[in-house]
Amino acid sequence: MKLTILNPKHVIFEGEAKNIFIPGDMAEFELMDYHAPIVSLLRPGNVVVDWKKKIPIKQGMVKFDHNECMILVEE
């Protein structure tokens, strides 16, 4: 899937991913290829891409649709 993580000033990460662990507002969840469409608020924590890359975030939101994941976070 295509993953883009950005804040108001710049792109933090852009690339392909097979799975993404995300700190949702109620609980952590995982997105995989062709997941059902979802929109969720995010709490502080780490976005983990392919079990390798950890990206710390404060809070934000995620939108997943048509195998594209867009994560918008605070600075």
Image (tube, rainbow, N blue to C red):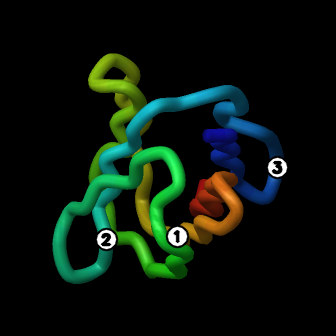
For this orientation, the residue located farthest to the front is: 34
Measuring 28% from the left and 24% from the top, which residue is drawn there?
Answer: 51
Name which of mark 1 and mark 2 comes first in the sequence.
2
**Residue at image point 53% right, 30% down:** 17
Q: Where does residue 35 sit, x and y in percent of width and height? A: 46, 61
For the residues labelled 1 and 2, say whether their Cβ atoms are less than 8 Å apart. no
Residue bearing the label numbered 1: 60
73 displayed left or right of 51: right
Please state which amino acid type lies under the numbered disc 2: Gly
In this rendering, the label closer to the viewer, 2 or 3? 2
The x and y percentages for residue 21 are 31, 47
The amino acid type found where label 3 is placed reads: Lys
Which residue was labeled with disc 3?
9
Q: Which residue, as the protein is rendered here, is positioned at the far left?
A: 27
Q: Earlier in the sequence, mark 2 or mark 3?
A: 3
Q: Position of residue 12 (x, y in %)?
A: 67, 35
The reply to whether the C-beta atoms of the residues labelled 2 and 3 are less than 8 Å apart is no
Kindly state the secondary structure of the residue where label 3 is placed: loop
In the image, which is nearer the foreground, mark 1 or mark 2?
A: 2
Q: Residues within 10 Å of mark 2 (few under 14, many from 20)?
A: many
Disc 2: which residue: 24
